[in-house]
Amino acid sequence: MNIALLLEMAADGAAERVALGPRSGGASYGELLRLARNSGKWLASQPGPHAGLLDGNSAAVPLLLFGSAFAGKAFVPVSYRLAADRLHAVLARLGPGVLVTAPDAALPVPLPEGLAVTVREQFLSEVRDGASDSPTAIPASEDIAALLFTSGTTGAPKAAVLRHRQLAAYIIGTVEFLSAEPGDAALISVPPYHIAGISGILSSIYAGRRIVQLDAFEPRAWVRLVNDESVTHAMVVPTMLGRILDVLLADGERLPSLRHLSYGGGRMPSKTIETALRLLPHVDFVNAYGLTETSSTIAVLGPDDHRRFAAGDAASRRGLNSVGRPLPSVQIEIRGPDGKAAGPGVSGEVFVRGEQVAGEYLDGGRLNDGWFATRDAGYLDADGYLFLDGRLDDIIVRGGENLSPGEIEDVLVEHPAVCEAAVVGLPDPEWGEQVIAVVVPAAGAARDAVALQRWVRERLRSSRTPARVEFVPSLPYTETGKLLRRQVRDQIAVNQVVSPT
Amino acid sequence: MTPEAGTVDLKPGSRWRSAVCDTEVVVVRASAGPVTFRIGGAAVFRADTGQDRPSPNRGGAQPDAALAGGTLLGKRYTDEATGLQVLCVKPGEGTITVDGRPAAVLTPRQLPASD
């Protein structure tokens, strides 16, 4: 079982249907398969076991993904936003091989040895002109389909290994073959080096849904593309949704073609999802929780859940903070510090097991009896809904009580004087850790720490009230909008030494 | 590889083709124990070794007339008694049987698209 088979099946079942690009003039499934096989032959003629990509979204992404499968190589999309030294380190680690790049890619000088750089257009022209008849290899289930560098919000980035059998199991277990309606189109705007960039291609191909790509995310371009290409499906990370809503509010656009919007890849602020539900009542919302190491989604909060929770009172609306229930094809278990399974409502570490769960890095596997420790903290409620408290390393332990920074941040950003907020724990002789809030004030708003402390105390228990509120001009995020809490904490700890309060 | 006496090692991920029709399947879930797996009433061949391609008309071999219900591309077939589940990756005219029982088409899943 391998991911190339998914494309071969779609080409067998719907050869003439448009697979990629505009409604008229896009590539059919038959054509995409031909190009992918050519890509495989071209990649097979290149040195090294990897096929690298340093670029945004274009036809080169699916062609390298499937072409790598046909060539028996691993597809390695690399972030084009890495600093030069980090990029050099990542490319050096991959060793000799082909690297397809954007025309204007900023490459490290000197390049690591053995790297054969090919500009995207040159790659696409090689692939278009290649002979199409000779058969290509059948990749083995155990072969590596993709290597993805994780965002590393709590440490150095690691190269996650995803094998053919895991990605194929995820798709076959969650997507019904050629189930898309004839007019369906999915907009892929997350970068290709994000797991959703890969799973989005595989899901759409297997479902028979036309893929529309946005080179790099920009909210106004995203809205325009949805309208121009009658996009019905899209996936965004929370920061992208926030910026899209700003455009909708400013321009009065309401995305009439859109029917289905899934989101994931970080904590969704309550304010953002409630605004989205209000502005786009015709859209089905899906909250998807997953990790690179689990081949994407492992739990979903579906459209009916969203509508039911949003229609209820304040207690019911808290359900919107859930990431939903586990997929039928995976098991999720919460374990306490003693390693034993925790009961409903009790927080612990989220463990997951299933055929799609890879839990492996270049330096070795991390599965224990099939179980993967996600390093995410959370709990399952009595109805089986999963709630996340954040990364385990970010949980604040104050006086023996586990506090979720995300819960406190959610309350802070509801205050009109707050634009962004980060909550971290710092060592405290009395409590173990104390709660520190770092706030980016709203434009022109007063910097009133006492008012913000009172605001939190009135809405959450007093243990969650920040002992201190710091005001900063901006907060550090990863390129897909994940808050770099460790960086905030390090910065605040340094400030504390320099100017004790 | 030659067809064995109907008992084959149906490992997850392994691919098999019919000796009497165009059907090819990939094993999604292994059975609880050894089973006799047939398509169109005949034993199956390994299809993922890249060898032993069938001749265009398979020497005139055809599915058993009583086991010619056909397979559909992309459908998952399952045998409840043993837990075996296969995915049809090439359709054909034969019926999939497990220990003589016709395998059932699995009901489509109702999961919302998440990526």
Image (spheres, helix red, strand yellow):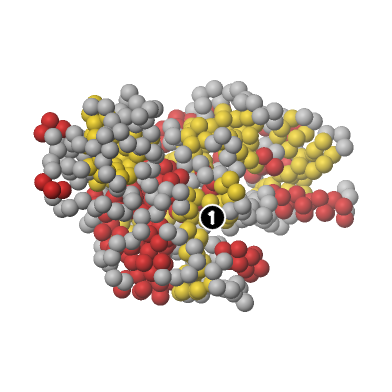
Residue A439 visible in the current orientation: no
Residue found at x 73% / y 41%: A452
> Where in the figure is residue A341, as x and y percent of width and height?
61, 26
Q: Is residue A210 above or below residue A401?
A: below
Q: Is residue B104 left or right of residue A388?
A: left
Residue type indicated by callout 1: Leu
Q: Is residue A284 left or right of residue B44?
A: right
Q: Which residue is mark 1?
A: A148
Residue found at x 47% / y 58%: A74
> Where in the figure is residue A132, as x and y percent of width and height?
27, 67
Residue found at x 65% / y 51%: A153
Number of marks present in the image shown = 1
Task: Name the element at disc 1.
Answer: strand
**Mark 1 burial class by Cα count in 10 Å: few <14, some 14-19, many 20+:** many
Q: Specify the subunit that label 1 lies on.
A: A
Q: Nearer the viewer, residue A172 or A184?
A: A172
Residue at the bottom extreme, as displayed: A110
Q: Nearer the viewer, residue A83 or A454?
A: A83
